[in-house]
Amino acid sequence: MTRQWSEVPTDVLAHYVPTVLAPDGRYARIRELVTSVGYLAEKLTRVGVGAVLDDLRTARRLAVPPQAADELAPIEVALTEAEHILRDQPDQLRGQLLARVAPSGAADVARMLGEASGWRVGTWWRPAGTIHNHGYLATFAPVLGFVDAVAMSDDASLLLAGDRDGQLYAWDLRSRELVRQESSGSPVNAVAFRPDSFEAFVGLDDGRVGRWSPADGRLRIGHQTGRYAVTSLAVDAGVLVFGAGPALHASTAESGRPHWQADTGQDQVNAVAITGECCVSGGRDGSLVVWRLSDGRELQRLPAMVDRVLCLAAVPGTDTVVVGGKDKRVVMVDVGTGSVLALGRHSNQVRSLTALDANRVVSGSYDGQVLVWDLAARTSSRIGRHNGWCLAVAAPRGGGPVAAGSDDGRLRLWDPDAPLTTDLGRPVRKVIVVDGIAYGGTDRVVLRADVDTGLALPKLKGHRRLVGALVETPTAVASGSSDSTIRLWGLGSNEASVLTGHQRGIEALAVTPDGSELVSVSLDGTWRRWDATTGSAGPVTDGRAAYTSVLALSPDGELVVTAAMDHIIEVWNRRSGQLALPLLTGHTGYVQGLAITPDGKTLVSGSWDRTIRFWSLADGELLQTLSCDQWIVDVTSTADGRLVAAYCADGTVILADPTTRTVQSTLDLGSRSYGELTLSSDDRTLFVLHTYELQAWDIDTAKRLAVFDADLPLRCLATAGPDMVVIGTDIGSLVPMRLVSPSHQMLLHGQREGAGG
């Protein structure tokens, strides 16, 4: 199939579906094409991802029976979600399909995934298992600036968004196409549709309020408030209400004629909502003021209940508004009685709210999370998450999909009623691989997954707080937790022995090269030795300050190197517990990476002070300092000692020769970020976790081999062979990823297998 389509002229490839097949309604043939990896890959490469998506939408529109369109929806969602990747890297198609399209009952979709899995051309990441958020429907991008305002029509057919660059965007939610884009001339702070209408109001940072219609996409200015920015607006019961500075304005929605204006007495109106015959203004001072909608008369003034009101949502059919604040709280207020009930908290400021129905409200926060709150049960559940700040959320009146905008220039769509498709746990903090099983430390549990299949295995439960340290011993997996305990889990067992003694959380674990002892460092400022087999406690050594999460042992196991919170590195004699060298001083920021060269002669440290330092382990002398433009967040060394890799938060990886202590090359990851480094088991490939990208680099040629963008924060990784890693995600899952390349890892791997046979 691939060879067949490669021989077809580009103009034929471009027009075959839209001008030949679609007019005749040849759905079966179109479906055959859009479930063929060969066709998708060839058209993607030569015509573009937009044309491929058009073919998929055509197939769904012509589907017979109509329910068959649902079988193709995951493919369209996957390619829409990965559009920004495939536009520049069409060779990543197979990996993106496998990662984003879950196996289904449709035979042709299953065949497509099998075809993608068996591909052997180019270099790409092949995941075992899918990476996606619960209820995820689509991504709309790119948007030029931060998406600060989002609204959805009542029939859930039109999505309107405004950004900080002053652009207005309108998408048809049925076709997923951008139908309008216009510049407003000022940052867009708020948008809202009129009930049962496609007309919307737009609040601008320069104090103007405009009226927008999809008929021509033009913004017609109707109000000018003066020097104050329009921060928020709401429209209902034929009235438009908006806040600007300390004033609240109301006008007739139909004609735009000013209705009334009130001085709220609030330093600034940050949010407004309409509930029944009243409207509510939320102030920067944290207070709420209730106004009669008909004439602007003040009815009630409620004292501050949050530290700065940032958003409001009226609950339909009630006198209740939900309030989000700078203090991360979400509270429910009865504006008739003034009673207040706390619903819960985000982990950062609550930036936006919208009502789904009389019992559910959706919130978006600077923590990136999109939460649905059950008002009766006073509980929340997460339906999705952005990689950055979630700045705006919207839903149609009466319920439907939830749209959320972010500072990453993307809008995403979620189904709040979708069945749970992924176990949305806490972020994975540490990953190791032992005997084909991946272990991941997260909140209170150790996750497990089969590396070959990606299938989850039963969790290891027992810790009471976050598990942030893992290491393999000869007979067990050791886990260290913020609950101050270490647990030794027998391989293949769900049972563990508990090691106690530390008074605060465990920051790092290491095992001596001979496997006899386990070493732990803690926030209590001590490091301890344990028998790695029995767990018996050995000597404890008191350091000078709480330790960070980095720890290194010399190749012979005789030296223990720790880094304290005061930026000082300590080199200890493991057996005596005494300092083997004078304190290594000079770093002025947290030490985030430690590596010892295989000959045991040189220690390499990386710090938030933007330096990489080389130290002599003979006498503690500082041998060399290399500088970076941003923090150093990780350091690793090849097994043969020929190179040291340091990850810099400016989006580069520095490869240095530890003997000459000079930079050999610098890898450009593409953007500023944070992440981790690890080397393949054969030292040929450097794997880099770059926020929500996984990159593979040939360490000898300094060339990038493959990139996988999960569109989801990736937290940590571990090597599982010469061509395989396991990543821990932000939603509490472990995903094995294999680097497929006939010219690099796969060829080498195949030769080794053949030699072993």
Image (cartoon, rainbow, N blue to C red):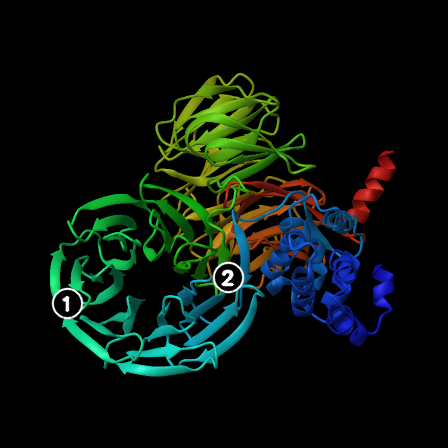
72 or 215: which is nearer to us? Answer: 215
* Mark identifier at residue 556: none
Image x and y of residue 199, in percent = 40, 73
142 or 172: which is nearer to us? Answer: 172
Which residue is the site of mark 2?
Answer: 672
Q: Residues within 10 Å of mark 1 (few under 14, many from 20)?
A: many
Q: Is residue 292 visible?
A: yes
Under mark 1, the amino acid is Thr
- Dot 2 lies on which element? loop
Dividing the image into 4 quarters, which one contains the N terminus?
bottom right
Q: Residue at x 36, y 74 (%)?
A: 202
314 or 738: which is nearer to us? Answer: 314
Please indicate whether residue 745 sits to the left or right of residue 6 in the image.
left
Q: Residues within 10 Å of mark 2 (few under 14, many from 20)?
A: some
Q: Is residue 573 visible?
A: no
Please indicate whether residue 622 sits to the left or right of residue 18 in the image.
left
Dividing the image into 4 quarters, which one contains the C terminus?
top right
Under mark 2, the amino acid is Arg
Q: Is residue 106 above or below residue 84?
A: above
Q: Residue at x 12, y 60 (%)?
A: 299
N-terminal label among 2 and 1: 1
Please indicate whether residue 440 sits to the left or right of residue 581 in the image.
right
Which residue is the site of mark 1?
Answer: 264
Image x and y of residue 291, in percent = 16, 63
Please indicate whether residue 125 sits to the left or right of residue 424 in the image.
right
Q: Residue at x 20, y 46 (%)?
A: 340
724 or 147: which is nearer to us? Answer: 147
Image x and y of residue 535, in percent = 50, 19
Q: Is residue 233 above or below residue 614?
A: below
Residue 660: which quarter of the image? bottom right
- Dot 1 lies on which element? loop
Image x and y of residue 603, in percent = 54, 44
